[in-house]
Amino acid sequence: MRILPHPTRRDALRAGVAVAAPLILPRGLRAAGRAADAIRIGCIGNGRMGRGDMLALLDRGLDPALNARIVAVCDPDANRARRAKADVEKRYAEKAPGQSAPQVDVHADFRELLARDDIDAVTISSPDFWHAGHAVAAARARKDIYVQKPLTYSIREGQVLVKAVREHGVVLQVGSQQRSSREFRTACELVRNGRLGKLVRVEVWLPPDSGQVHAAPTDPPSELDYDLWMGPTAERPYVELGVHPREGFGRPGWLQREGYTRGMITGWGSHMNDIAQWARGTDLDSGLTEIEAEASFPDRGLFDVHTRYFASGRWADGVPLIQRTDPQAGVTFVGSEGWLFVRRGGIEAGPASILEESIGADGIRLPVSNDHYRNFLEAVRSRTDPIAPVEAGHRSNSVCVITHIAMHLGRKLKWDPASETFPGDDEASALLDFERRPGWEL
């Protein structure tokens, strides 16, 4: 594991109210591994995924060895922020009855939260187009980061974020939780150790998007700062079904609108292509060298991301990566001596004996994490990289983004993973980033 430099976080003692352990300790001792000083977390984005991330870290943080506390929530939708505060307070009352819970502050603007000296780490569970803006600002504010996948919307954003994380010495865990799954780790170790023989091809299977929305714009609700919600992306009229539900935590409409997301190619692709990259050992500093794709973009009203697609790419050693839509998401590795299919909750191989083979003492062993949230808090304590560091998130997402670019251009693209460019292809290179609204430049 890479050891991260520890940035200066506080210049004096920091006081707070304990749930299961004190919140007061001189600066620097928490980073040295002592759990007496709580990791104080602010949660940016309190919707469907944000609520899950927030409560999961709350639960893990009650372990005295990790000792983390949710102390702030942040969302431009005031209803969601207030609900998040209530959820945190209720959870503390249930999990630590009779003990004093930390005060939970509510923010609408993430910049206010990041300006606080008493917050050590953040969760970022905002829409895809906001990930880079929130995460780069958090890294520059020297906050450790748990960010939902995909890491960023564009390749350029990923480059900026990798640089910011390393320059400021913060921990970043991407929400690629399959790395904390025994099945996926086992599959990657078997491939890396040649148990399938010579690798012939890799196939990634992703579910399709569906449905349609036809609705007229309305005024944004009073509880939503819609201009702040749009942030860096292009201004659009407000339609509730194209943003997120005013009540409840149903799947938000932005997940099927280009400009906010790229669709399933990054939504699920960032998970499955991450496993393809991890198994090959190209997850930190490399990727495909060519890609071509075709996709369906049917008229679905507000929803305009791809539905079904097929893509064919290739790594530098000639091994192809095939990506296609399928109801069951997973990754298939085909070798000269057998095959292996891995999905969430299951792994199969032919011959089946492949799964019984021992890696051996001299084999390649991947880092072990059995709980993605716990692994993040452990990395914050130890100042080491977590199981899904920023480079892995960027390289795996890059596979998805260049595939999406190929979908739109409809031709084979050459990609240089070293320079992260489309050599000599101005049309494709123009799509490596997007134009931000004034005031939201990285």
Image: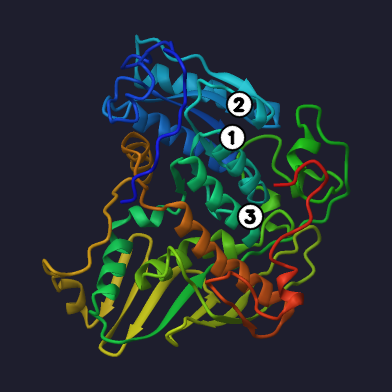
- Which callout, 3 or 2, points at the residue further toward the start of the chain? 2
What amino acid does circle 2 point to? Leu
The quadrant holding residue 69 is top left
Mark 2 residue crowding within 10 angstroms, few (<14) / some (14–19) / many (20+): many
Q: Residues within 10 Å of mark 3 (few under 14, many from 20)?
A: many
Which residue is the site of mark 2?
A: 113
Q: Nearer the viewer, mark 3 or mark 1?
A: 3
The residue that disc 1 covers is 44
362 shown above or below 323: above
Farthest residue, direction left: 361
Question: In the image, what residue type sits under mark 3?
Answer: Glu
The amino acid at mark 1 is Ile
Is residue 296 in view from this perspective? Answer: no
Residue at the disc numbered 3: 157
Q: Nearer the viewer, residue 47 or 437?
A: 437
| Label 3, label 2: how far apart the Cα atoms are | 22 Å
- Lateral position of residue 82 relative to residue 232, left or right: left
In the shown orientation, is residue 98 left or right of residue 85? left
Q: At numbered mark 1, what does the secondary structure look like: helix, strand or loop?
A: strand
Residue at 32% x, 55% y: name it.
181
